[in-house]
Amino acid sequence: MTEFSRRDFLKGTTVAGLGFLGPRGKPSKQDSSPVKKGKGPIIISTWNHGLAANEEAAKVLKTTGNPIEAAKRGVMVSEADPNVTSVGYGGWPNRDGIVQLDAAIMRGEDLEAGAVAGIEGIKHPVAVASLVLSETPHVLLVGQGAQDFAIEYGFKKENLLTPQAKEAWKKQAPLREDHDTIGMVLMGEDGKMAASCTTSGLAWKIPGRVGDSPLIAHGLYCDDEAGGAAATGVGEEVIKVAGSYQVVEFMRQGMDPNDAIKRVCQRIIRRDTSRPDRMVGFVAMRRDGKTGYGSTTGNFEAAVWKEGKNTLVK
Ligand code: SD4
C-alpha cells in the first residue's frame, strides 16, 4: 500500500467502518459469582519503578475513572525514565544498536486490546498501543507500520538511545536476560480492570525479535470476569506457556492469584530444568481485588497500591 493510500485508509477507517472484521462481542459469562465493586483503586505492577507508575495510575484513576487511561499513563512514567533500562527511552538496544520497543494494553470490560511490536523512535509505545485499541479494528501493528501509524497520530520520532545505553551496547556481551519490564494490572472503584505492558525487550536481541510483552495472552491478559495478569522476564518462556492467559484462567477457576502464578511458574521450570536461572515473573489481580505476584527465581519484586498505600513487596 502506498503512503498516500495507507493514510487514506487510516483516515477513513473506524471500527464501525470495518465491520467486515466482525463485531467484538461481549464475553459470555462463565462464572456467576459477582464481581466485588468498591474495592478499588487497586494497582499492581512489576519491579520497584512500578511504585512511580502506580502513583500516576492512581491519580488518573481517581480523576478520570478510566482504567485504560490509568494503565497507559502509569507505565508511561517508566517509558520516559532513562534509568529504567528495559523500557522506552533509555532501554537497551538490539544487536545493531537500535532501540526497538514492544507494548500492549487490554481492557477487561470487553477484552478490547491494542499493541505494537518492534517500533522504533517512539518514546511512548503504550500510548500508540492504546490508539490501536481505540482507533483501529486491529490488535497488533509492527515495525515500520506501527511507526507510520504513530506519526499519523502526531507522535514525534526521537532518538531513544541514551549515551549510557550506547556505552553498555558497545561493551555488549551475548544476549542479556536482565529484566525490568513494566507490567501493570489495575481495578477502579467500579470493579473495571485494565492491564498494560511495555518493554525494550531483551538487550542485544536479534533485530526484529518480539517477546511476550506485546502479545495478548502472553505478556498480559485482562478479563473483568476473571482478573488480569502481566509478565516480566524471558519472553520466550512466557510465550511457550501462554503465561498471563493461563494465570487468568486459573483465577477464573477460583484459584488464589499467588497459587495461579505459582502453577504457571512451575510449568515454566518443568519445561526446561536445565536453565533454573531463567527468570519469569508475574503480577496478577483476581476480579475480587486480591493481588498476587511471584517468579521462577527468587529475585522479583512488585509494587502494590491498595487503600491509598503504595508498597514494594519482595
Ligand atoms: C521480553 N519480557 O521482551 C520481555 C523482557 C523483560 O525486562 O521482561 N525485560 O522478553
Image: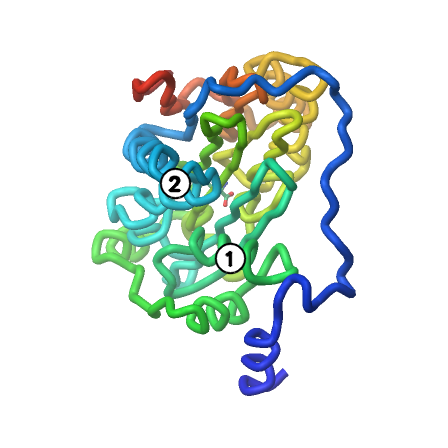
Q: Dot 2 lies on which element?
A: helix
Horizontal and vertical percent for residue 25?
74, 46
Horizontal and vertical percent for residue 248?
64, 27
Foreground tag (1 vs 2): 2
In the displayed structure, 85 sits above or below 124; it is: above
Looking at the image, residue 77 sits to the left or right of residue 228; the answer is left
Residue at position x 77%, y 33% in the image: 28
223 vs 196, nearest the viewer:
223
123 vs 189, nearest the viewer:
189
Q: Dot 1 lies on which element?
A: loop
Q: In this figure, which residue is indicated by the disc labeled 1?
A: 206
Q: Amino acid at mark 1?
A: Ile
139 vs 67, nearest the viewer:
67
Q: Amino acid at mark 2?
A: Thr
Horizontal and vertical percent for residue 44?
43, 26
How much space separates mark 1 and mark 2, taking CA atoms? 40 Å
Looking at the image, residue 183 sits to the left or right of residue 109; the answer is left
Looking at the image, residue 198 sits to the left or right of residue 287; the answer is left
Q: In this figure, which residue is indicated by the disc labeled 2?
A: 64
Residue at position x 30%, y 44% in the image: 77
Q: The N terminus lies in which quarter of the figure? A: bottom right
